[in-house]
Amino acid sequence: MPKVVDAPRRSKDLLKAAEELDPVEFDHFASDFIALLRRRSPAGKQALDVQLVAQLNVRLPAAERRRLYELNAKREAETLTKQQHQELIRLCEKSEQFDADRLRALIELAILRKTPLALLAKEFRPKAP
């Protein structure tokens, strides 16, 4: 169970509280802190904006996308082999990870730009392959 820590008010107190976190919690804290630093500095905001927009354009490679569609068609036709089924699962998981990463980037960008998520989702809607 995560340790509950009172909100410290001074930087020394913050450091002391961070020392008490278990390694996994500390890694999450460190990542969140670095993201906060980027959001708070003007140069960091611009760099983070560029990084997030680039991440929104990352997709499953075209060859894997085509294979996913092929395997999905075979699944619907009920002609998948066991090996193809495993490949389909692997490609689905990979595609879902891309989608989750994209959504995470979209949410961060909405927060950074102080823009409604729906508006950014429309602006950065994936282009058809």
Image: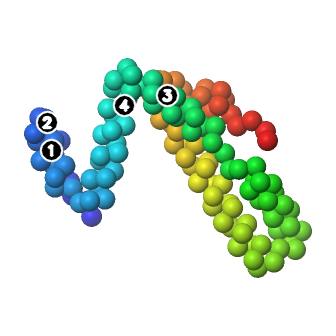
In the image, residue 117 lies at what x, y percent?
A: 55, 31
Question: Quick one: which residue is furthest to the top in this view?
Answer: 42
- Toward which corner of the image does residue 10 lie, by quadrant? top left
CA separation in Å, label 4 and label 3: 10 Å
Kind of residue at disc 3: Asp
The residue pinned by badge 2 equals 11
- Provide residue 102's location: percent of width, then percent of height: 58, 43
Residue kind at label 1, given as amino acid type = Leu
Determine whether the residue tagged by mark 1 lies in a helix, strand or loop.
Answer: helix
> Pointers 1 and 3 in contact (CB under 8 A)?
no
Looking at the image, residue 115 lies above or below residue 51: above
Tell me the tag on residue 40: none
Considering only vertical position in the picture, is 116 above or below 79?
A: above
Q: Residues within 10 Å of mark 3 (few under 14, many from 20)?
A: many
Q: CA distance from mark 2 to mark 4?
A: 18 Å
Q: Residues within 10 Å of mark 2 (few under 14, many from 20)?
A: few
Mark 3 to mark 2 CA distance (whole Å): 27 Å
Residue drawn 47% across and 35% down? Answer: 108
Query: Residue, x 63% and y 58% (percent of image)?
Result: 94
Question: Which label's residue is closer to the chain start, 2 or 4?
Answer: 2
Cα distance in 3D space between marks 1 and 2: 6 Å
Residue drawn at the location 68% of the way across and 50% of the way down: 60
Question: Disc 3 designates what residue?
Answer: 49
Where the C terminus falls, by quadrant?
top right
